[in-house]
Every structure is written in structure tokens, then in C-alpha cells.
Image (cartoon, rainbow, N blue to C red):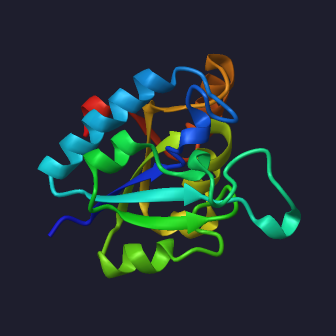
Amino acid sequence: MNNKALLIIDLQNDYFENGKFPLHNTEKVLNNIKQLISKSQQQGIHIIHIQHIADSSYGIAPFFNEGTTGVEIHPQILQSAPNGEVVIKKFADSFYNTNLESVLSKLEVNELFICGMMTQNCVTHTAISKAAEKYKVSVVADCCTTVNEMLHNIALHALSTRVNLISMADI
């Protein structure tokens, strides 16, 4: 039994070209994450998709609105990990008001590898969540992105005092 999980945060269509909020370097990160998924599957690492769906009670959000193609997980990610569990979130912290902890508990996970979008927001908030403190947490730096390279690097530097920063080669 493998007690590790890969959390793939917000690999959703709105963050890619022709989406509502395209990010920097998405095609390279998409390809890196597909390789990471393959490596994880070979090692028996559990794969969990985290999907952000905007809370419609606050009105229409700029992106990730329920029922749109933009909110959907990128098809290449779903094709690479079709059996990954999907956790729905409404906040940056993937643990907050979600079933992520119960999913991890059911799988007896004690180590997390975190990747996805956006480095300074959902990746960071999940990695340093109060709920994440009981896990060994690593952020896979070359499998994350945000609006530009500078903000990505600033976020990684800030995270470096709290969690391990690794590359996909380290898994």
C-alpha cells in the first residue's frame, strides 16, 4: 500500500488558451503534469483532482462558473488519470469545506505531492493549510504555474520555508 497522494489543483480549462483567465506557461506545465501522473501511477501514488467551482451565491464569478466548459478539468489531465478521485472546492485552500481530508484518510495517505494552478493562491493555500500540517508536504515546482514567472518564483520562495520544494524528477 502506498501512502502518498498527488494533488492536482485546478487544472481547468479557464486557465488555458481560449479560457477566461489563461495563465503563463500552461502547455509546458500541462505536459509536465501528464509525465508526473504517469510516474505517480507507476509508483502506486494516489491521484486526486482538485476542481474549483465558483460559489454562485456570490454572483457570477470571472471564471470557473458551474456548467461552463471553463470549469471542467482539462481533458488531457482526465485522460491521463481517469480514475483519480475529484474533490470540489470553493476556496483557495483545498481542505477548507471539502471532503479532501476524508478522501486522504480513507486512502491512509501521510505524504502529499502538490502541483497545479495558481502557485501563489490555491497551491500555496493548500500546501500551508492548517489541515495539511499532519502530512509530509512537497510542492512540485515545475508542475505549477500562475500569471507570470516572477509571481510563480516569489510564491515558491515564500513556500520554501514551510514545505519541501521538489521537481518532478524527484518523484
Q: Is residue 75 left or right of residue 37?
A: right
Q: In this view, which residue lies farthest toward the right?
A: 59
From what the image shows, is residue 106 above or below residue 164?
below
Q: Which residue occupies 44% across, 53% down?
A: 137
The answer to which quarter of the image holds residue 151 is top right
Which residue is more in the foreground, 2 or 103? 103
Quarter-wise, where is residue 76 in the image? Answer: top left
Q: Which residue appears at 19% of the width and 64% of the height? A: 2
Asked where in the image residue 130 lies, by quadrant, the reply is bottom right
Residue 118 shows in the view: no
For residue 160, above or below residue 17: below
Q: Where is 100 relative to 83, above or below?
A: below
Q: In this view, does 90 lie above or below 137?
A: below
Residue 107 percent coordinates (x, y): 29, 75
**In this view of the protein, which residue sits in the foreground, 88 or 40?**
88
Decide which of 53, 155 is in the foreground and name it. Answer: 53
Could you say where residue 127 lies in the image, as x and y percent from the top left? 55, 52
Q: In this view, does 166 lie to the left or right of 51?
A: left
Q: Where is residue 32 in the image (x, y as percent from the top left)?
A: 34, 29
Q: Which residue is drawn at 27% across and 45% down?
A: 80
Q: Is residue 128 left or right of residue 44?
A: right
Quarter of the image with the C terminus in it: top left
